Amino acid sequence: MQLTAGNGLGITIDGTGRWGVDDGSTGQLGFTFNGKDLLKNATTGRNEAGLMLGLSATRVSDVVKISNTTRSTDWVLQGSIGTGNTSGDLKELVAVYKEAGTVTSPLGLEITQRVYGWNTTSDVGYVILEYRLKNTSSDTLKQLSLGVFADWNLGTASENRADWDANNNLGYIYESGGTGTHAGIALLTAQTSQYYAFDQDGTAGSINITDGFSKAEKYESMSSGNLARSKAGETGNGNDVAHTVGASIITIAPGETTMVAFVLVAGTSLTELQSRVTQAKSRFQTRYTSPTPTLPSDLKTCGPTGEVTVTPTGGTNFRFYDQVPTLGVTTPIGEGASLRVANITANRTIYVTSTDSLFEGSHTSVTVRYLYPSVSIADGLRELCVDGNLTLTASALGAGSTPLSYQWQRNGQNIGSDSVAVLINEPGTYKVTVSEEGCTRTSSEVTITQIQKPVIAQNGTDLAVTATADALTYQWFYNNLPLTGANASSYTPRATGAYTVRVSFGNGCEVLSDAFQVEVTSLSQAPAPLQGVKVYPIPVPNQGEFTLELPQNTSSSKGYEVTLIDFAGRVLLKTGFAQGGKYLVNLPGHWPQGIYFLKVSSKGTSTKQAIIKLAIQK
């Protein structure tokens, strides 16, 4: 069947592994380029090009020449040649063949051969020859070699040369003079290339194929080394040359299929051949590049150490990378249908390609979001005032813009608060758990203590208060009035009455004790009371001015001594008056408010005394 492609290139295949066929039947094209069959031997009238496969010198299946009049027929077409994919500019022929029953040592292979090209201005002068080799035997085929043999006849066949272009895996034949026609075969797939250039008459150490082409010689030409013989026709004006371009397949397991592909190319120069090989490689790679996988739009994992499974869709076999992959260079971190990624402690990007087809596809990526919000309880008060409360506030930071949620606990039990701050009025151990998209983290605990009401106790003649070590200041009171200078944790009472103390702990927390009743007694005989002493107004106003009224002298009194004492027993003012009467007394304005005592004693043979309690207000 014929295929025309590449704007001026035509090829005929017979469905048994031969290509470029022209046995004289009507319509056969051989391998025609610009109107010329580049395989036609003008002397024999035969075209020789086809497939060879072998495991050893005695185990070869092929369809190429045995002599100038006979050829091997080891492959048999299964069914008929099909047209394959013919969409758009693509033209394709497909044939399936197996080894004939007459083959004494069959390899156990089924071959699906495709020949295709494109009728576009950029796809001139080439067709792609593709073989899919399926091992139908129960044995693993090891060290299998494949060769494509071609006896090109360009212009004057005896003036041809053969050479090898390692950069393009291209074996080519060209005229040493004349039209400059070039033709060749290049390996497109990734196997190790093989090449053998024949001087057909056996000169310069070449295998001689003019006297026959044996199975052993065929095997030698496709297996004797990467570049067993890279040139032919080197002397004089050239020679009648041919070549085998091959691939070392290594192994094919039972039931496994391996692809090997070549481009058959023609042109007017080596540069033109190379350009067309490059175009063919691009077309071939595009056709067999795996599709780009589809990944989940969002993946997340929770700290402190997260893990996640990346499962792509749009294929079955994938490669996973932890950096943008350079194909053939970057080593994957995993292969298969999915990848389990563990020990994640930060955002991590995974890059994925598909390997379902011959060539690894373009990568796509997904970033695994690591969620482990930071959380602590902000510094602040850690003591509750008596009957007071305080606010605990969480300091938290998440990875994204999603609002955080909170759960507060007291002594290990939820307390119902789900906001960033909580108002508490009970002592205990508190912590908060913050949640970001279902990922949680709990703060360190803080201990909240309760300030206790101070208790007054009597120790001999002193009163003392027990309070926590955090107490900052003290203020004692007598009958609910502040005692000037009474600012220590203990106090010596001077008069009978109710004493209380106010303890300040800072941060606005002031606690007043319960009243402690004191009765002051004396063993010494008190002076007789002095009658008629008056002080007004009481309480003394903030100007510190009051009137003192003293009784008139008697035969036993010779004036008066007046003393002003604060509640701590300190004498603040001492003066005397010779006669009774009314006197205006002015106290210093800087004296603090509180309780003071005014002691008035008569002078003379019989001392009498009056004590009056003053309260100075501010």
Image (spheres, grey):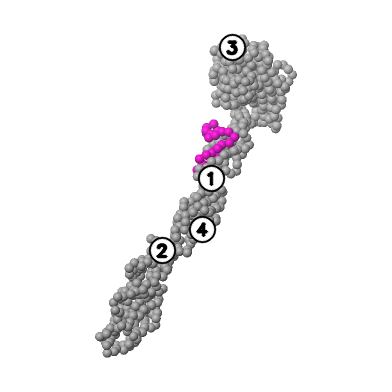
Mark 2 — residue?
505
610, 392: nearer the viewer: 610
In magenta, the rendered stretch is 324-351
- First of labels 1, 2 by sequence position: 1
567, 344: nearer the viewer: 567
Mark 1 — residue?
302
From the image, state whether disc 3 or disc 2 is nearer to you: 2
**Residue 148 in sight here:** no
- First of labels 4, 1 by sequence position: 1
Residue that appears at 51% across and 41% down: 344
- First of labels 2, 4 by sequence position: 4
What's under tag 3, amino acid-wise? Answer: Asn
Which quadrant of the view contains residue 289?
Answer: top right
- Left or right: 175 with respect to 487? right
- Left or right: 305 with respect to 463? right
- Left or right: 429 with respect to 460? right
- First of labels 4, 3 by sequence position: 3
Q: CA distance from mark 4 to mark 3?
A: 98 Å
Q: Specify the quadrant that holds the C terminus.
A: bottom left
Would residue 328 be counted in the magenta stretch? yes
**Residue 426 in sight here:** yes
From the image, state whether disc 3 or disc 1 is nearer to you: 1
- Left or right: 73 with respect to 459? right
Mark 4 — residue?
422
